[in-house]
Amino acid sequence: MQKIVTYFTENIEEVLNDKASKDILTQIGQLDRAQRGILRNILFESAKSLNPSRNKEETINWLHKCFQLIDRNSFHFDKVFFSPGPEIEQTIYTLLKGAKTSIHLCIFTITDARLAEELIKCHINGIKVEIITDNEKTKDPGSEIVTLQKAGIPVKTDHSRYHMHNKFGIIDGRIVLTGSFNWTYTATEHNQENLLTTTNYDIVRQYQSEFNRLWDEMFWFNVDTGKESEA
C-alpha cells in the first residue's frame, strides 16, 4: 500500500492527468474494501503536506483524481451465470485458478473431476482450502470428496438425517459464489441452474461468518472409515 501512496505523491502531474502505471493499477486491484479505506485516509493526510507552492484547488483535484483511480481500478466481480452450458463451471474453474490465499467451500456435492483437480492444485500451491459438504453425498458414485480429503484438504460434514444443502464459496475473503449450482456434470450439461458472484464487502463478510460458524459445529470427515468424528 505504501508503494501506491509514494507513487501518487511523487507523480502528481501524472495523477492530475488521470494516469498511473500498470503496476500501481494492478496493486490497487488487489486491495480489499478495508485496505482501500485505509489508502484513502493516508492519501487525505498526505494531501496536507504536499508541496505548499501548489494551490488548494490543485491539491483537491489531485486527491479527487487519486480517489477516482482507486474506484475505477478496484476489483469488482458482480455477475450472474446460468446453465445448462459450460459458463458456470468455467467461471468457477477460473476463480479457483486465480485464488491467492484461501478457498472456503460449503458445497452439497462435488463430482466434477476438473474442479476437484484444481482444488488439489491450489492446496499443493499453499492456498488454504477448506470444504464443508453433506455427509450422505460423500458416498455418492463419482463423489470427489474422498479424493480431496486424501490429498490433504480438510473436509467437514454434517451429522444429521437432514442435508447440509448450501452451495456457496468464498475465495480470498473477497468474492462469494453462490446459487443453485452443484459441482456436478449434470448441473453443467443438463440442469437449469444459476450462479451469482459478488465482491460486495458486506455480503462476503456475512458468508464468511456463516462458513466459520458451520466449520466450528461440523464433524471431521474420516476418509478411512467414511464416517464423521468430532476430533
Image: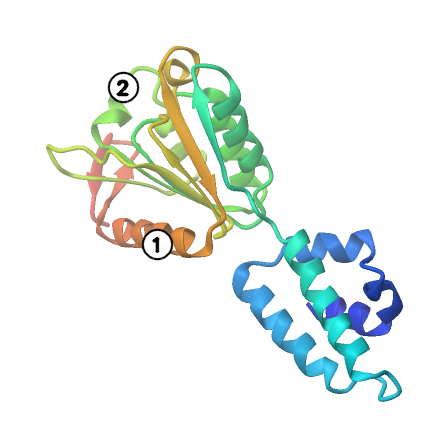
User: CB of mark 1 within 8 Å of CB of mark 2?
Assistant: no
Q: Circle 1 sits on which residue?
A: 206
**Residue 158: image x %, image y %?**
20, 39
- The amino acid type, in three-letter code, at marker 2 is Asp
- Farthest residue in the front direction? 57
Q: Is residue 101 above or below residue 124?
A: below
Earlier residue among tags 1 and 2: 2
Query: Could you tell me how far apart the alpha carbons at marks 1 and 2 are, in whole angstroms?
Result: 30 Å
Q: Which mark is residue 54?
A: none
- Farthest residue in the left direction? 161
Residue situated in front as seen by the camera: 63 or 182: 63
Q: Quadrant of residue 52?
A: bottom right
Task: Give the residue drawn at x 46%, y 51%.
Answer: 200
**Residue 123: image x %, image y %?**
51, 41
Q: For the residue labelled by badge 2, is the local secondary structure a helix, a strand or a loop?
A: loop
Q: Circle 2 sits on which residue?
A: 140
- The amino acid type, in three-letter code, at marker 1 is Gln
Q: For the residue labelled by badge 1, is the local secondary structure a helix, a strand or a loop?
A: helix
Task: Give the residue drawn at x 89%, y 87%.
Answer: 53
Q: Is residue 157 left or right of residue 96?
A: left
- The mark lying in front, picked from 1 and 2, is 1
Q: Is residue 128 above or below residue 110?
A: below
Task: Give the residue drawn at x 87%, y 63%.
Answer: 14
Label 1 packing within 10 angstroms: few (<14), some (14-19), many (20+): few
Q: Is residue 122 above or below residue 183?
A: below
